Image: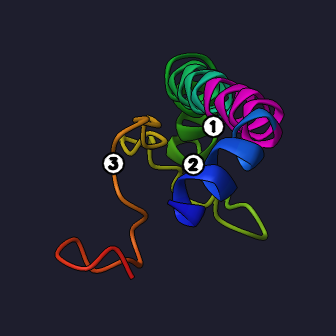
Amino acid sequence: MGDVRQQLALYPLDLPFTTHISKVGRTLGQSVEAYNAAVGSLERQVLPGARKFTELGLRPAKEIDELVPIETLARAVTADAPAADQDESTGQ
């Protein structure tokens, strides 16, 4: 019974944390979308012109690093999921 009381006492403290972590997840997703849009723009608008220079025989001092779109998104928070480092059978 003491466990339940302790959890209920901490419940209001968890609400701001979950609000913050949800915001972090949303902004991570927005960052990934912005990064992928920038990579697409680079591929469509900048790199074709840069390739023309090399076709004309001009060699850059440093090659442009390959930029790969990010396909992994932040994991969604689920209220009833056990923590990743907990054993699901014991909750420890």
For the residues labelled 1 and 3, say whether their Cβ atoms are less than 8 Å apart: no
The residue that label 2 is drawn on is 54
- Identify the residue at image location x=39%, y=68%: 84
For the residues labelled 2 and 1, say whether their Cβ atoms are less than 8 Å apart: yes
Q: Which residues are magenta?
A: 13-27
Mark nearest the camera among 1 and 3 is: 3
- The one nearer the camera, 40 or 28, is 28
Give percent across and percent down for residue 39.
Answer: 57, 32
Give percent across and percent down for residue 43.
Answer: 51, 28
The residue that label 1 is drawn on is 50
Q: CA distance from mark 1 to mark 3?
A: 49 Å
Q: Secondary structure at mark 2?
A: helix
Q: In screen coordinates, is 86 left or right of 9? A: left
The residue that label 3 is drawn on is 81
- Please tell me whether the stretch drawn in magenta is mainly helix, strand or loop: helix
Q: CA distance from mark 3 to mark 2?
A: 53 Å
Amino acid residing under circle 3: Ala
